[in-house]
Image: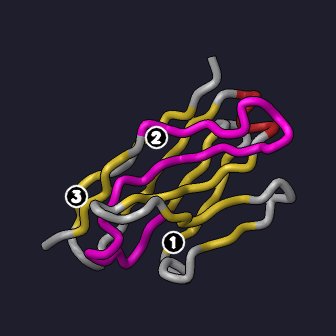
Amino acid sequence: QEQLVESGGGLVQPGGSLRLSCAASDIIFKFYAMTWYRQAPGKQRELVAGFTRAASTNYADSVKGRFTISRDNARNTVYLQMNNLKPEDTAVYYCNARNVALMPNDYWGQGTQVTVSS
């Protein structure tokens, strides 16, 4: 069964860093574009950072210069390095894989909580 498994969330002080990981099955990693989303309490889910099928990257304006998305093809894993974290980064972070030409179009991870607080 194809799946995404996230890890790496936790509690960190403002200005700190965390690295999230998203491990994918072979088919997902090879054929789907990988993206990180987040959802804060009472807010809609929003895109944080992602790869396109052409392997370019895009970031939300709010995280540019602080977050970096990367991938390890040997491990079928996508990472989100988050530096200089702010309280407004507090959210559940989700890994997403998307390919509108395949069924299913989307896979979602279970989510990992990131809390930025002193």
Pick whichever of labels 3 and 1 is earlier in the sequence. 3
- The reply, left or right, for residue 34 in relation to residue 6 is right
- Marks 3 and 2, Cα distance to the nearest angstrom? 16 Å
Task: Give the crowd class for mark 1: few <14, some 14-19, many >=20 residues within 10 Å.
Answer: many
Q: Name which quarter of the figure residue 44 lies in.
A: bottom left
How far apart marks 3 and 1 lie (CA) works out to: 17 Å
Rendering coords of residue 70 (x, y %): 64, 58
Residue at 78%, 43% in the rendered image:
99
Callout 2, which amino acid?
A: Glu
- Which residue lies under the disc numbered 3? 11
Magenta-tinted stretch: 81-110
Q: Quadrant of residue 61?
A: bottom right
Q: Are marks 3 and 1 in contact (CB under 8 Å)?
A: no
Residue 15 magenta = no
What residue does disc 1 label? 67
- What is the quadrant of the C terminus in the image? bottom left
Look at the image and tell me in which quarter the N terminus lies.
top right
Which residue bears the numbered disc 2? 6
| Badge 3 amino acid | Leu
